[in-house]
Amino acid sequence: MKSKGELRYLSFNSRDNDWGIVTTSVGYQFIDPNNPYPLIGHPDSYLFNNEGRILNEYQLVYIVKGSGEFTSKSTNKQHKISPGTMLLLFPDEWHNYQPTRKTGWHEYWVGFKGKDIDNRVKNNFLNKESPIFKIGINIDLIEIYKKIINLVIEDKKGYQQMASSMVLHLLGEVYYKNLNYQLEGNQYTVEKINEAKYFLRKNISSNHTAKDIAKRLNVSYSWFRQTFKKHTGVSPIQYQLQQKHLYAKELLSDPNLSITEVAYKLNFENVGQFSTFFKQREGSSPTSFRKTFL
């Protein structure tokens, strides 16, 4: 079977840049076994040579079939690539990747750039040292790539903003799925974190410490604290305070409960303490918040 692909390179203007992200390229390459890689038709700035390449944009490359290898300046070693792997390429970062000749591979990619993406890298949501995401085969992700390709082909007014918003959606999906893919690989960890979250939600009004919860789970305090924050983004106590805040908003929306009763249900010593807690998190007092419902 002959390899095939669709390669599209996009133009954008200063108004498109103001959106915060622009899509620069999109396409797919289905490379069959014993076929050359990449397909012809790439502009010179995108071509590989024996020494790899450097781009001036970000790219998300999704391998959905076959196998290969990847390396980059920041990872500084060769990685085996299998189906269900997403590669994030960074601008001005040397990299090299290719399918195994015996297997070939099927890939989708989209290129993009902009201040919104730069800010995500600056805040370490994405980093050059971790450009490989093992997320598995996901039809929804493939459909996003196909939708971006179709938008570009149709070339309707505003397609840049629509396509770029889909790229942000794609990045969010990858970030989310990668975190959960890692977590689900350890069933013991999944069970312990879920048990802790359930306990904290069911005991919003209590003042259990992280040490209390670790003891209840029969795990060490340091393991629990570090693992919980790694997989939720917040400490156990901050998670409980978040849940208490959400529950407070739910209770305040009930006109049959006074603010004093809400404070009591949440185990605050007095209304003043509750009001301070609520205003710090919501930005408005319980009374002001309640007026939006009553």
Image: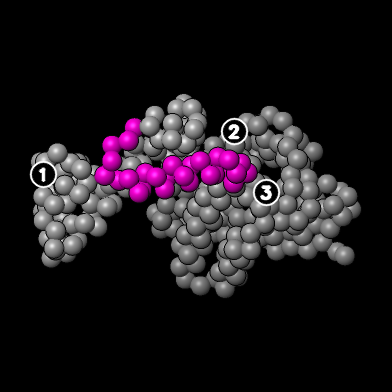
The residues tagged by marks 2 and 3 sit, at their Cα atoms, a distance apart of: 16 Å
Q: What secondary structure prevails in the magenta region?
A: helix
Which element carries disc 2, helix, strand or loop?
A: loop
Instruction: Name the side, left or right, on which 189 lies relative to 273.
Output: right
Q: Earlier in the sequence, mark 2 or mark 3?
A: 3
Which element carries disc 1, helix, strand or loop?
A: helix
**Quadrant occupied by the C terminus:** bottom left
Residue 38 seen in the current view: yes
Q: Which residue carries the number 1 mark?
A: 271
Q: Nearer the viewer, residue 220 or 75?
A: 220
The residues tagged by marks 2 and 1 sit, at their Cα atoms, a distance apart of: 49 Å
Residue in the image at 59% along x and 52% along y: 111
**Image spot of residue 184 (x, y percent):** 59, 46
What amino acid type should be assigned to the residue bearing mark 1? Val
**Image spot of residue 97 (x, y percent):** 74, 43
Task: Determine if the magenta segment contains residue 83.
Answer: no
The residues tagged by marks 1 and 3 sit, at their Cα atoms, a distance apart of: 52 Å
**Image spot of residue 98 (x, y percent):** 77, 45
Which element carries disc 3, helix, strand or loop?
A: strand
Residue in the image at 23% along x and 44% along y: 281
Q: Which residue carries the number 3 mark?
A: 85
Could you say which disc has been placed on residue 129 in the image?
Answer: 2
What amino acid type should be assigned to the residue bearing mark 2? Glu
Q: Nearer the viewer, mark 2 or mark 1?
A: 1
In the picture shown, does residue 166 fall above or below 150? above
- The boundaries of the magenta stretch are 183-210
